[in-house]
Structure formats: structure tokens, C-alpha cells
Image (spheres, rainbow, N blue to C red):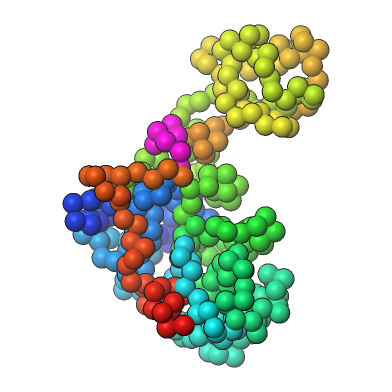
Amino acid sequence: MSLVIDRVTKRFGSVVALDDLAFEVPRGQVFGFLGANGAGKTTTMRIALGALRADAGRITWGGTATDALPRRTFGYLPEERGLYPRMTVLQQLTYFAGLYGLPRDLAVREARAWLARFRVPEFADRRAEQLSKGNQQKVQFLAAILHDPQVLLMDEPFTGLDPVNVSLLREAFLELRDRGKTLVFSTHQMEMAEAMCESVAIVDRGRVVVGGTLREVKRSTGRRMIRIGIEADHRLEWLATDVPGARVIRPGIDRSDVELEPGTEPDAVLAAALARGLRVSHFELADASLEQVFIDHVGRPADEEFTLAGSAVPDASAAPDAPGSSAGSESESAA
């Protein structure tokens, strides 16, 4: 069983937001859907949820079109927050769970258990407007998972979270994955995807430019890399002189990534460091980072927006939410 995006095309007027988009997400994986702002990530998720209709192609789960599946099959965490400001956390979590058919007593029990898991049991009786943006994000995540969906679609789930809450959310991701859930999250934070995902797809201008397992994608550029740590000499300023075929492309305090030109052997860097009397604390062959892969394939940083046909590519953020979604303009206005 898998989530299949099968040659999906979507236009907004003269702008092609999705252009024959195709990739597959195996069941039970954490999958990174990566791209710059406006690349088509949100539009794809909204088509999967039935909030938008594709002009061509289809999205299926286990061979069935997603818009024909029960709505509780999916959970959705939108990038924009859609909580009712004056409702308590427990009230709205049970309300959203009820939209998916979860009995109230079970919803209350699950909500309290997850709030305790996130170290905020006291939030149950607080209004959403009393919470920080990061804590609202956690509550909205719970609204997306309380009904126990098979597939969880998340749009920039780590936005606004501090390191502690990022860690809690990562633990929740892994627990859900271990339960057999399929998690797809969009982001332009390459380091986060690299730390969490088993497979990824990088999309640019509505098309997948590279996809597959994390290892396959990181090796897709053909770069030859090493990762080296030199005690008391972190900047490696000597490297360009001693080993002309080696170039530091990502300097770090403890370890730095070095790219090797064809014909330059990794041992040449190690030998040069030892010849200078430097103490090497770390040395390994390495793959390119996802950030490097992204720039190689897309040609610009992941947080840079692009325009097409003279206007910004829409991300469907103004489109109506899928039935049972925990976010949307209706939620905001009704509150």
C-alpha cells in the first residue's frame, strides 16, 4: 500500500502550479516533500484531501482515489493556524475529532494523553488565544492525529517551534511511523528533512526534479565528499593550498564538509593535515547534504520564492479546507 501522486497537473489561470507531478510514498515511512516557497507542495496536499481538484492525473491511497476514501483516512496539519481562539484546547480537540467520527469519551481520553505526552496537560482548560504560536502549533498537530489517521499530511510542521518542541514533535513522528502510519511533511528546511526522512522528493515549479530514498537523493549529484574535524583548526584555511583539488563547502565548528574534484583522493586531505602536525578528530567519507543537492538541482536556496509567467505561483493557501480539516478561514471567523 502506498500514496501515489500519479501525473498530477493543476493550473491557476495561466500559471501551471503542478506540471505532471509524480512520486510515490510507501506505507509506514516519514517522507519529505521538499521545495521552495510556491513550488506546489500545499497545492498537492489540498488535492490529496479533496479541497482542490486536479486538472489531470490523480492521487490514490492503496489504489483508491483519495477523494473516494473516508475522510478519517487522512490527517492534515496546515501551515496556517486555524484554531478557535476562545475555545479551550480540550473543547476544540474533541470537536475536531468528532468531525472524523471519534466518540467524545475516546477523544477526551486521547487528547489528555497526548497533552501529557507533550508535557502540557494544563493546556486542556486554556483557550487557544492564551497559548504561544509554538504551542498552538502543537495543539493543531494533535487535532490532525487524534482520530488515528492512516496518512498524515503536514505543511511546514516545524515552523515557529523552539528546539524542545521540535524534539517532542520528532518523537511523535517516529512513534506514529512505528505504528505503521504514513507521514508526509513539506518543508524548505533541508536539515530537518535530512534528520528525519527515509525518502524524499524535491519539487521545483510543480515537477519532481529528484526523488527516492534519502541515500539515493544525496548521491544524485555525483559529488565526492569527506567530512573532517581538526582540533584547534576549524577553518581549514590551509586546505586550498595543500590540496588544490579539495574545497570546503560547508565549514563547521566541529566538522566541515569538503568536496573533492575528480582525481583527488580522500587520503590526500588526511595526509596534508597530518603533515602539518594537526590533530584529526574526525574523518569519514560522506554524501552531499540535502541542501547541496537542492541547490544543484534547483539552482537556488530552498527558502527563495520564484515567479512564473510574471506572477507568483499560488500555493492554494486561500483554497477551502478539506472536510474535517482542523484549519481554515471558517474556523478563524467563527471564533
The correct choice, above or below, for 118 with respect to 243 in the image is: below
| Pick the front one: 118 or 85 | 85
Residue 12 pos. (x, y %)? 23, 57
| Pick the front one: 133 or 187 | 133
- Looking at the image, residue 279 sits to the left or right of residue 38; the answer is right
Q: Residue visible at 73% across and 32% down?
A: 254
Residue 217 pos. (x, y %)? 47, 38
- Can I make out residue 11 in this image? yes
Residue 200 pos. (x, y %)? 47, 47
How many numbered circles are shown? Answer: 0
Q: Residue visible at 58% across and 66% down?
A: 133
Residue 136 pos. (x, y %)? 58, 70
Residue 191 figure quarter = top right
| Pick the front one: 57 or 159 | 159
Q: Residue visible at 62% across and 73% down?
A: 131
Query: What segment is highlighted magenta in the picture?
Result: 295-302
As drawn, the residue found furthest toward the left would be 14
Residue 250 figure quarter = top right
- Looking at the image, residue 28 sits to the left or right of residue 285; the answer is left
- Can I make out residue 71 in this image? no
The correct choice, above or below, for 306 with respect to 124 in the image is: above
Q: Residue visible at 23% across and 51% down?
A: 15
The correct choice, above or below, for 324 with respect to 228 in the image is: below
Q: Is residue 235 magenta?
A: no
The correct choice, above or below, for 246 with respect to 27 in the image is: above
Give the quarter of the figure containing the N terminus.
bottom left
